[in-house]
Image (spheres, rainbow, N blue to C red):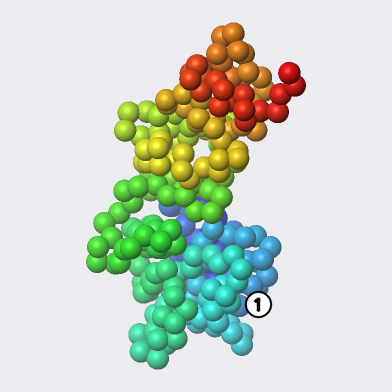
Amino acid sequence: MRILVAEDDPIFANTMEILIDELGYDLIDIVDNAEEMFSLIVATKPDLVILDIKLKGLKDGIEVATSISKSANPIPFIFITSFQDSQTFERAKATNPFAFLIKPFDELTLQRTIELALYKYNNAILDNESFGGWHKDIVLKDSFFIKVGQKLEKIKILDIVYVEIADKYAEVHTENKKLVVRMPLREILTKLPPQDFLRINRNLIINAHCIEHVNLQDHTVKLHIIELPFSRRFKEHILSRLNTLQ
């Protein structure tokens, strides 16, 4: 997951860099003013923005958040602040932030706050009192966010080659990695774009763009990285999805 930070305190900016690195996330940059922040949001398209309310220059973090909220493709954002006055809080609250962090905070607090922000962004009904940790992986826009150790790993949906059921969970396979998803296959199927993915047997979903050939005699489908069996009852469904010449 790629994170962009706005923080005007050099000492705390250094702390943020260390914490984000320890959590295993990709820190795009840390800037200290709204103008740079606006430019980097457009240029880098981060997955999450962490904003200090107090910034250098004419605009503060609340004004950055207001612009993010009104954009065509809003990004989840978290406020970090040492302010405790009610006027600042009311201004910040009006932007509908996904979470607040009060300085100082530790690695675990940052981790939980990031998880909470992404849950809220995924329209989960959670609050700080009820949130107990990451129990289920989610799909945001064109990507999965999967819990791996202490971090949330982002996998673009179209990078998935196939998904296979494994006990109570599902394994998501890309060209170079395998990740276990805390979500039943049935639910995953509803999250995948039907024009790009198809089910080939009871336990497998494949990316149609990765198909190299279909062996009708052996009932197998060759993908970029593996050959997989398909069920006879899914044969017509598979053929109907492919552009074939009779």
Does residue 7 appear in the picture of this structure? no
Whether 130 is drawn above or below 68: the answer is: above
Pick out the residue farthest to the top.
217
Q: Quadrant of the C terminus?
A: top right
Does residue 48 appear in the picture of this structure? yes
Q: Residue at image x 54%, y 32%?
A: 198
Residue 232 placement (x, y as % from top left): 50, 16
Q: Residue at image x 60%, y 71%?
A: 71
Residue 108 placement (x, y as % from top left): 33, 58
State the SS at label 1: helix
Nearest the eye: 4 or 136: 136
Dot 1 corresponds to which residue? Answer: 35
Residue 228 placement (x, y as % from top left): 53, 19
Q: Residue at image x 33%, y 51%?
A: 134
Q: Amino acid at mark 1?
A: Glu
Q: Residue at image x 37%, y 28%?
A: 166
Nearest the eye: 129 or 230: 230
In this rendering, the count of numbered labels is 1
Question: Splitting the image into 4 quarters, where does residue 57 fall?
Answer: bottom right
Residue 82 placement (x, y as % from top left): 39, 80
Number of other residues with Cα within 10 Å of mark 1, as a class: few under 14, some 14 to 19, many 20 or more? some
Pick out the residue farthest to the bottom.
87
